Image (cartoon, rainbow, N blue to C red):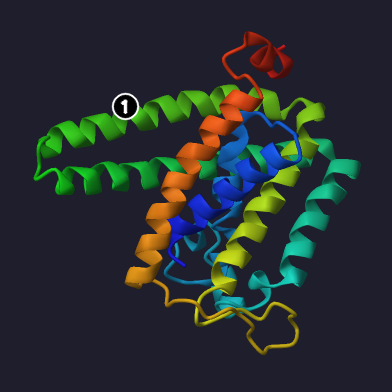
Amino acid sequence: MLAINHVTLATAATFGASIYFDKPFFLPFIVFVTFSSLLPDVDHPGSEVSNYFPFVNKVFKHRGVTHSFFGLGVFTAALFTLLNHNNKVLSIILIVIALIGVQYLGELIKRRIGHLNDLSNDFFSTKQVKLAAQWFLWILDLFLIALAFLIWKERFRQEIIILLSIGYAGHILGDFVTKDGIPLFWPIKKRQGLKLFRTGSWVESIIGFLLLIANVYLIYLFWQKFDLSNLQYWKNYLS
């Protein structure tokens, strides 16, 4: 599955689970889902996340251990272990993750802005598109600074770890439905999957469009259910 669809699948799953189980989370923490929804592709030399961890794809083959229940378990267990034993180290790790997550989010939105401009027959100039994207990235950077202060608060870390785990699991699900499949029960190397479509096919393009619509609708439901227009929601996290 393509990177953008990994992200939209994971965020849709996050909003859906939050609404279904009546468990709100702090909306800006969605950047952690963005990061972890792409993390399993750290074993792919052509992926963006591998640029941050270039040594991993030299050790592991693509769609190997990172795309399995074992990989998900190790990732989640490591985070919870740090949560219980070394909060300062965990805080630093989470801040780095937030930085990468914001960067991913910015890049994906920049691409979408450019894509929408192509569809509109270049209604906006290239300079205007770049300026809009740059302003958005500046806003995201300011947001990251504010987010870093929240991460230092211990009461938010468990929520962040749960969101990271959901994002990682969302990636595994996304590749599980493709024709290539994944070694879900690694170290058993046989790949399992629903084999519904090939990565990058027109079928995935349709699914990606539907996921985008689903995200908009789920964000609306999330906003309404947990009354994000009420300042009390924000005070619970910012106070």
Q: Quadrant of residue 239?
A: top right
In the image, what residue type sits under mark 1?
Answer: Trp
169 horizontally vs 158: left or right:
left
* x 55%, y 65%: residue: 174
Q: How many badges with numbers are in the image?
A: 1
Q: Quick one: 65 or 51, which is closer to the camera? A: 65
Q: Quadrant of residue 95?
A: top right
Give residue 97's position: percent from left, percent from top.
61, 44
114 horizontally vs 15: left or right:
left
Give residue 53's position: percent from left, percent from top.
55, 61
* x 38%, y 32%: residue: 137
**49 up-or-down from 45: above or below:** above
Q: Is residue 103 visible?
A: no
The residue pinned by badge 1 equals 135
Q: Is residue 36 visible?
A: yes
**59 up-or-down from 125: above or below:** below
* x 64%, y 16%: residue: 234
* x 38%, y 70%: residue: 203
Q: Quick one: 231 or 98, which is closer to the camera? A: 231
